Structures are given as C-alpha cells and as structure tokens.
C-alpha cells in the first residue's frame, strides 16, 4: 500500500452544496495547506470510476457532506459504501457533516432519504440494502451538525480545525515510522520551540554532515505545520540552491510560496517584511553555510511577527551563534540500540538483525560510529547480499576502479580524510569532485588531472599545503570551470594553471599562506582572493570575455603585494572596462588612489564634471562611465564575511532641470569569519548608461555629478576623508567606425576648454601602460 496522496476526500451531492457549503469548506482546507480531493473533473455515470476508487484509496480522512438529497445520487451512495470499506480495511477516519438535515433522519432513512431510496429500488434492487446499511453506519459516527454549529462560517472553520488535529495525529503516528530515534529529537526540540510563547523564536539544529539534521527538521515541520494556518515553508539545501542559482532567486521562490503571491526582485525589503508580519509563520532553512545567507533570505528575528518559529540547520555552530538563535540543539551520533535498528531496517527490512549476521552487523556499526546516513547507505548496499560480500565491505574500498560510471563525488565533511586513492584518475565519467571541509586532507593525486572535471572544490581544507603541478599535457582538465582552494594552506600555484582555458571561477579566499599567483587563465570571469594576507605576486591575463560577459576581481587585505602586481591589476581593469564585450566589470584591490587613467578625480565622496569636459562632438558616442572610490580602512560598511553595500548616483543638471539616477553597489561573498579592511582599498566598476531612460538629460546637461550616498540614498554623514578618501569618473565611448576615423584624419586641433583625459575605446595600451598621460586618451 502506497502512502496517502490526499489529506481529505470530500463526498457531496453537487446540486445541493457544490456552490455554497462545499466550496467554502474546500477553500478553507486549501488555505490551511490541506491537500483535498474534490471530484470536479470526473465524469459522472451509473457507477463510480476507477479514478475515484483510486482517490478514495489514497486519502487519509473522508468528509461526507450529508445534504437533503445526498441519497438521490447512486454515485454518492457508491462512494459512501467504498469509503466505509476503506475505513474498515485501512483504519481511516470518516467525518460526517449533517448539512441542514437531522442525523436521525439519515440514520433511519426518513423523509427525503426514504423517498430517494424508494426511487432507487426498481433500478438497483439489492444494492439499496447495502446503501441503507452504509447510511445507518455513517450517521452513527461522531460528526458535525449545521443546525447546532452556526453560522456556516464558524462551522467551516471548526471542521477544518478538527481535520488539522486528526491529520496531526496521523503524522505523529505514521510519518516517523522507520525514522529511528526520531521521537526523542522531536520531544526535545518541541520543548525548545516553546510554542505557547507569543514571541519570535529561532531554533538551530547543529551537527556533522549525514547526522540527520535535515530529517529531524522535516519531521518537526510535518509535526507542527498545522498550527500555523498554511504560513509554512521549508527552504531545502540552502547552500546548494544558492550555488546553482543565486540568493535572490532562492529568496523570491520561497517567499512566493510562503506568502502565496508572486514576489519579484524589484519589491522592496520593507514591503516584504510587512507581508511577513501579517501572520505567524513556521520556516525551515536547511543546510545554511553562513549567516550572510540567512540574512539575505530575510531569515532573522526582526522579519517576523510574534508567534513565528524559525528552524535553521547547519554544520557550523558559529553560523547559528551569529544568527543569534534562541536555542541550539546538537544532534549527536546515534547510540548502539538506535544504530542497530536503523541499519537493520535497511539491511534486513526489519528492526532486528538475522542472527547469523549479527557479528557482521556489529562490525559495520563499529566502523560507522553512529552516523545515520552511512548506516542507511551501507544497509541498502548490503541488503540481500551473501556473507562473502559483507566480509569484503567491512572497510571502505582503497580503489575507485569499480565506480567507472560515477559522475559526481562528494566527500564533503569527511574530516578525517587525509588522502585520496590514486585510482580516482580512472573515473572517466566524473565531472564534479567536492572535498569541502575535509579538514585533514593533506594532498591529492595528480591522476585527478586526467579527468573531465568541471568543478573541483577544496573549500575548507586547511591542511592542504601543495597543489600538484598540472602536466603540460593536462588532458581533460581543460573542462574545469570552477576551482575553489578557499581556506587551504597552499603557498604557491603552479605555472601550468594558465593552461586551464575553460576556467571561469577561481576562489583563493582565506589562503593565508599563499604568496605567489602566476599568470592566470585568460577566460576567467571571477577571481576571489579575500584576505590573502601573504600574497606578494599576482598576475592577471588579458583575454576575451567569457560567455557571461562579466568580470569581477577581489584581492583584499594583501599588505605585502608588490607594485608590479598592483600595476598589472590596474592595467587589467583598464583593458576589461575598455572591452565592449563586457557589460559588467568590478575590481577591488589594495590601493590609496584613483588610477592615473581616470581623467576626473577628487578627494571626498563626490565629483562634478562640466559639459565641455565631455566634448560636444563626442557626446553621441558616450555609453557609460568607469567609476572609482578609494575606501579607507575604517569605511563604515556592514561587513560580515565580505559584505560591502553603498548607494551612489549620477546626477545630470541642465537649465532648470535635474535628473537623478540612484543605484546601489553590493559586494557579498561567503567567507568563514568576521573580518574588515586592514588597509585602504580601491574599488572601481563599469557603469553602462540606460540611454533610453536618460533621454535628453545627458545631451542637455551642463554638469554631471558622481556621488556616494548612504544606504537610504542620502548624502553621507560620516567624515569622508577617513572613509571615502577619493572618487573618480571616466567617460566611456563607443568605438568610432572607419568612416569617422577617415574624416578626422589630420585634424590635430584639440577641443576648447581644459585638456581633459577620457577613455576612448580606440586606445591600445600595448606595453607602455606606465607612461600614459592625459593626451593619450583624446579621441
């Protein structure tokens, strides 16, 4: 027998109640997230269809709406008979609702019930006796009488509440079957939730990978969701979802489900919070990797109304502490009794081991050490296998040779893993290898470089101190798209990393010992090197824009980086901003001044340029600006992990008119702990104008102002000399066509007014970057 598909099955006579009582009840049930079957779409006939039989079988609770002429429908009477059979066979619950009829008239088939059954005699014969027995039986059950409970709205509400209680009882007795030891987890977390208190409470569930955090959180959700009137939602695999899409997509998706409306990215956060505070909610955020994720998903106390309960699961206790959860529940390894029972459920399909296998089962338990996921996996793998197979599976294999079809391998959280078998190089189908948080991993075999990997993740491997040299014939590693060495102890990257032509994302953040980064691959669109404090040398590589047409580069708190590297970084910023194939470019690196190639710069947080600085004959080619700010080490941004947010604006002023175009720059990346700038940093980015929106505002402008604002869009109130030290603006122009170049040939006359540098896409820096002066940029 399969699990019930529907919570409730509604049996009713359409002509009597479809457009009044039944529709109201159906709406109330759906509003409480109770999955309800209603037979609107099924064709009627003399006998009920197989589809209806199936729906009856797959329902948990049956609501029989006994109206005045319910018995006139042979279809309804057949439904009732089958429902009562299901009640006997499956132990399901039946709730009669006596809608404007006396229960005794139904029980004894008097008045309209008697008249309708008499009409059936000639056509259905002996079947009528079975129908009478069914009516007598259902009328004897405890139910609801519309003549006692009124008005109708109250009746509908009370029936729905009754169903919720009954469903909750079913959940507690059925949902957890097979989830060994679940009752004690639920009991303890229930006490921590303190549902009786009218406050917002956040409960953290903390434990190692595979320990059962997600299972426990789901069980808690199933147990208590009925107390929150459909304002309930699970956000599963938070970290994985964000990696596959982005945090904004995950946020909008779960909010749309929770609020039962389409939430767009353009909606303000204050509007979302107002909606969240309309009713108490039950929310589960599963597998949160850092507090920043929770904050960006509106998962903190201040976003919810009193009575709400938020459950967060994480492997990292610090994440829960940073989130200021009210209680943290630690999920420890299972004890021997529960481990044996769980393993047996998967290995033998029963709660006790087969006697002749007991010693083998105990050896598995000793090896697994109470980890539920491992117990399930090994139990499933050994089910039905002879003892010989059990004997050879007492230890993990030293070779991957038998896993030739394996596509993804995650060893995430294997904290005792020190090395990887060299046979991993034989996994020809492997495209993703995740070694996140393998805290003891010291090295890995060069055979990895024979694979067609697209993603290789060493995030959180502090013992990893060397990276094998990528051979000249690096084979299939040319497929690698993402490489993360974040948090490793690597000192130098091999020169051959430049050969990884498909690499798009390189994460070196928190590599505290990293000193040298050689010339990088040409097609990267993301280089993350937050808090690389030992870097002395880093060389970027000019290349064509990748398919994403974006480029972001971060090198922070690198006080030892040499002048040659910084010069190279500035040059790459110039080249990539100059490349029209990129629509978005952002650089953040140590620096105390706006680069020399910015023609307009000024101390403080704003700068204004005059219209003649843009040259009227060039204005029709203006497509945007390169913008730059120098942030002091005490810049008052909200930084947790790495999080810079500030507003900025471009203002176009003409005779009697001002166009104000505000925007916001947000830089958010997942790092491990609290940190801040230890030195000044230069932040520059490409801003493309929305010419359709600006219209004649640019053409008519006498002045253009670039200014940094606070998060509310107001002028900065903090001391600009110690926070935003300097800012700069550089106009960007489209490339002239050949005809334009010919027309201008020989015309060396400079435009009137001050000689002002501006970025022209015809300029090639070549090898003379260090000697550029203002006139080199005049188009």
Image (cartoon, rainbow, N blue to C red):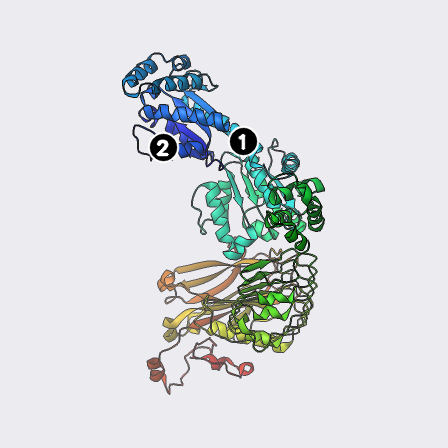
- Which quadrant would residue 344 be assigned to in this image? top right
CA separation in Å, label 2 and label 1:
24 Å
Q: Is residue 343 visible?
A: yes
Tell me if 752 is positioned left or right of 118 in this view: right
User: SS for tag 1?
Assistant: helix
Tell me if 44 is positioned left or right of 424 in this view: left
- Residue in the image at 63% along x and 77% along y: 563
Q: Which residue is mark 1?
A: 170
- Residue in the image at 44% along x and 59% along y: 661
In the rendering, at what x and y percent does residue 366 appear? 72, 48
Which numbered tag is attached to residue 178?
none
- Which quadrant would residue 636 be assigned to in this image? bottom right
Q: Quarter of the image containing the C terminus?
A: bottom left
Q: Are marks 2 and 1 in contact (CB under 8 Å)?
A: no
User: SS for tag 2?
Assistant: loop
Badge 2 density bin: few <14, some 14–19, many ≥20, Cα 10 Å: some
Q: Nearer the viewer, residue 211 or 579?
A: 211
Q: Is residue 219 above or below residue 121?
A: below
Q: Is residue 226 above or below residue 16?
A: below
Q: Nearer the viewer, residue 232 or 79?
A: 79
Query: Along the polypeptide, which appears first: circle 2 or circle 1?
Result: 2
Tell me if 594 is positioned left or right of 732 in this view: right
In the rendering, at what x and y percent does residue 4 appear? 48, 35
- Residue in the image at 52% along x and 81% along y: 773
Q: Is residue 12 visible?
A: no
Could you tell me how many numbered marks the image carries? 2
In the rendering, at what x and y percent does residue 631 appear? 60, 64
Q: Is residue 225 above or below residue 128?
A: below
In the rendering, at what x and y percent does residue 162 appear? 50, 25
Badge 1 density bin: few <14, some 14–19, many ≥20, Cα 10 Å: some
Q: Which residue is mark 2?
A: 39
């Amino acid at each position: 027998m399969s699990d019930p598909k529907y919570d409730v099955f509604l049996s009713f006579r359409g002509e009597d109640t479809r457009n009044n009582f039944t529709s109201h009840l159906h709406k109330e049930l759906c509003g409480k997230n109770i999955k309800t079957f209603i037979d609107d779409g099924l064709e009627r006939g003399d006998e009920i269809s197989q589809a209806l039989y199936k729906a009856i079988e797959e329902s948990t609770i049956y609501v029989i709406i006994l109206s005045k002429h319910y018995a006139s429908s042979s279809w309804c009477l057949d439904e009732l008979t089958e429902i009562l059979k299901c009640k006997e066979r499956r132990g399901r619950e039946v709730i009669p609702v006596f809608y404007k009829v006396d229960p005794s008239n139904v029980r004894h088939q008097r008045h309209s019930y008697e008249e309708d059954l008499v009409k059936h005699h000639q056509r259905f014969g002996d079947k009528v006796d079975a129908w009478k027995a069914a009516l007598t039986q259902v009328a004897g059950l405890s139910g609801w009488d519309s003549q006692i409970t009124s008005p109708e709205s109250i009746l509908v509400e009370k029936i729905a509440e009754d169903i919720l209680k009954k469903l909750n009882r079913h959940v507690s007795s059925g949902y957890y079957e097979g989830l060994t030891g679940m009752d004690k987890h639920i009991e303890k977390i229930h006490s921590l939730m303190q549902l009786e208190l009218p406050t917002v409470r956040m409960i953290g569930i903390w434990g190692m990978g595979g320990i059962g955090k997600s299972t426990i959180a789901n069980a808690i959700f199933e147990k208590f969701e009925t107390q929150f009137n459909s304002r309930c939602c699970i956000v599963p695999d938070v970290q994985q979802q964000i990696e596959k899409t982005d945090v904004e997509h995950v946020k909008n998706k779960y909010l749309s489900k929770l609020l039962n409306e389409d939430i767009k990215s353009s909606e303000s956060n204050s509007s979302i919070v107002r909606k969240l505070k309309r009713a108490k909610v039950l929310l589960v955020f599963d597998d949160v990797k850092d507090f920043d994720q929770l904050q960006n998903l509106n998962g903190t106390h201040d976003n919810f109304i009193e009575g709400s309960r938020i459950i967060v699961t994480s492997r990292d206790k610090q994440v829960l502490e940073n989130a200021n959860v009210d209680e943290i529940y630690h999920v420890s390894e299972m004890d021997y009794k529960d481990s044996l029972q769980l393993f047996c459920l998967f290995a033998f399909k029963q709660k006790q081991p087969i006697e002749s296998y007991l010693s083998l089962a105990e050896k598995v338990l000793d090896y697994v050490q109470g980890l539920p996921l491992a117990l399930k996996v090994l139990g499933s793998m050994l089910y039905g296998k002879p003892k010989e197979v059990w004997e050879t599976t007492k230890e993990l294999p030293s070779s991957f040779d038998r896993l030739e079809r394996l596509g993804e391998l995650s060893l995430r959280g294997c904290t005792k893993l020190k090395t990887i078998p060299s046979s991993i190089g034989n996994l020809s189908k492997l495209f993703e290898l995740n070694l996140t948080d393998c805290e003891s991993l010291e090295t890995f075999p060069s055979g990895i470089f024979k694979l067609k990997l697209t993603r290789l993740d060493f995030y959180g491997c502090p013992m990893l101190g060397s990276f094998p040299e990528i051979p000249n014939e690096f084979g299939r590693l040319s497929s690698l798209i993402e490489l993360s060495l974040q948090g490793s102890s690597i000192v130098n990257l091999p020169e051959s990393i430049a050969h990884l032509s498909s690499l798009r994302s390189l994460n070196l953040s928190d590599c505290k010992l990293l000193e040298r980064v050689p010339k990088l691959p040409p097609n990267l669109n993301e280089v993350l090197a937050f808090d690389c404090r030992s870097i002395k040398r880093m060389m970027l590589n000019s290349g064509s824009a990748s398919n994403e047409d974006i480029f972001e580069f971060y090198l922070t708190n690198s006080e030892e980086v040499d002048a040659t590297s910084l010069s190279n970084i500035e040059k790459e910023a110039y080249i990539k901003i100059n490349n029209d194939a990129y629509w978005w470019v952002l650089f953040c690196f140590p620096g105390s001044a706006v680069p020399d190639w910015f023609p307009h710069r000024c101390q403080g947080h704003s700068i204004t340029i005059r219209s003649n600085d843009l040259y009227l004959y060039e204005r029709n080619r203006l497509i945007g600006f390169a913008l730059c700010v120098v942030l002091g080490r005490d810049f008052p941004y909200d930084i947790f992990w790495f999080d810079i947010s500030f507003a900025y604006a471009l203002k176009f002023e003409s005779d009697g008119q001002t166009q104000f175009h505000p925007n916001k720059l947000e830089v958010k990346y997942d790092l491990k702990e609290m940190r801040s700038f230890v030195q000044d940093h230069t932040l520059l980015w490409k801003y493309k104008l929305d010419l359709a929106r600006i219209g004649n505002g640019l053409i008519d402008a006498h002045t253009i102002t670039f200014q940094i604002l606070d998060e509310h869009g107001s002028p900065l109130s903090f001391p600009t000399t110690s926070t935003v030290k300097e800012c700069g603006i550089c106009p960007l122009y489209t490339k002239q066509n050949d005809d334009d170049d010919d027309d201008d040939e020989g015309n060396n006359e400079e435009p009137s007014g001050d000689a002002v540098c501006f970025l022209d896409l015809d300029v090639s820096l070549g090898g003379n970057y260090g000697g550029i002066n203002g006139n080199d940029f005049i188009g």
